[in-house]
Amino acid sequence: FFNVFISQMLVLELYFVLLMKSHLQSYPCPLQINFFWNFGFLLGVAIILQIVTGIFLALHYTSDLNSAYFSLFFLIREVFYGWCLRYFHSSGASFVFLFLFLHLGRAMFYGSYFYNPNTWFSGIILFFFLMAIAFMGYVLPFGQMSFWGATVITNLLSPFPSLIEWVSGGYCVHSPTLKRFFIFHFLLPFLLCGFAILHLFYLHFLSSNNPLRNSTNNKIPFFPFIFQKDFFGLILVLSLYFLQTHFGVSSLSHPDNALEACALLTPLHIVPEWYFLCQYAMLKAVPNKNAGFIILLTSILILFFFGEIRNLTTLCLLNNNSFSLSFFFSLSLSFLWIGAQFPQEKFLSYARILTLYYYFLLMCILLSKKKKKKK
């Protein structure tokens, strides 16, 4: 029996070694891919760093209404290198979304959704997961902006009967809300890892896309060629991480969030972190709360249509939509700016026009005509 057990373990170990070798060493990658293909790897590294630092932060965090804010400051001031953990984690969230947007932008520009639709679908699901995890994590420090941001978003659920009470554990954001958000913020990243493995499975099933936007037999092994590019990007990103953590090059968080939450004092301007500003600008642009919530959801759900592009139309080939895509990326930057402004009439008007333009541009990208070749 012992010999059979040993032989089975050796076979499993051999399978594992061959699996790692096939995916990390001899995996064939297109020769033409450029540095834009590094962002997927960097996003994965950023997520792993968030999980590791988050586990250590969870050891010191107290998910109670009266002590959540003070447990964070105890961590920063009293725990050895606690400040480094905290700022590595809070700045890391911005890095995760920066790499996510660049990765998503590259996939849109080079038409990855056309060639690998399953990879695209799993990627959008990962996007949803990351947004939910980031929102719940932002609530946990329980500063002013955390409390009021949670109040605004949970109140969007008011069209559904009793859903606010069910989610929040009461009629407003209170101690049960904080406990629930902490539990989900801790557990969901591990579920996210499962979807990330599925994402990689679909990617390696068909191989990566390339700038020529067609399948090619001109392949090179992942190690050492692509690995060197990824490793260089990793060193660069870690340098940026340490610069941001130790020197605070950019103040990524709102100053109001350093104040303790007070239900009797509303901030002058409730504004989320920069990576939610696009959706927040659309939400502010619509006067009706329920319609705003629908716009908020459909602005991301519409990306699922890209994976179904072959079923939607036969007119599509992705060599004639660079103009629409350039406008789309400019539009995203405009939304970032508008989302950070006060809800004045001129900014709301800009946001309403750009929200309509957002959906129009996505339709232009989806239904782009095939360029006919001259004989």
Image (cartoon, rainbow, N blue to C red):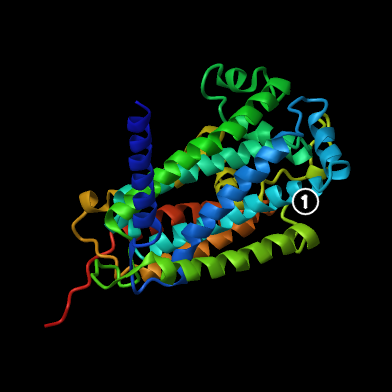
Asked if residue 303 can be seen in this view, the reply is no
Tell me if residue 201 comes above or below residue 150 in the rendering.
Answer: below
- Residue 366 location, quadrant: bottom left
* Mark 1 residue element: helix
Residue 144: x and y, percent?
78, 38
Residue sitting at 57 percent across and 61 percent down? 334
Q: Assess disc 1: are there few (<14), some (14-19) or many (≥20) residues with their C-alpha within 10 Å of its C-alpha.
A: some
Dividing the image into 4 quarters, which one contains the C terminus?
bottom left
From this viewpoint, which residue is outermost toward the bottom?
375
Query: Which residue is drawn at the image coordinates 55% and 47% (left, top)?
Result: 279
Q: Is residue 137 above or below residue 39?
A: above
The spot of residue 333 in percent (x, y) is: 56, 62
Q: Quadrant of the N terminus?
A: top left
Q: Nearer the viewer, residue 182 or 277?
A: 182
Q: Left of 349 or right of it: where is 27? A: left
Direction left: furthest residue: 375
Image side of residue 12 versus residue 330, left or right: left
* Residue that badge 1 annotates: 84
* Total residue callouts: 1
Measuring from the top left, give residue 100's x and y in whole percent.
Answer: 51, 55
User: In this view of the protein, can residue 6 be seen by the observer?
Assistant: yes
The amino acid pointed to by label 1 is Cys
Indicate the quadrant where residue 263 lies: top right
Q: Position of residue 169 (x, y in %)?
A: 65, 18
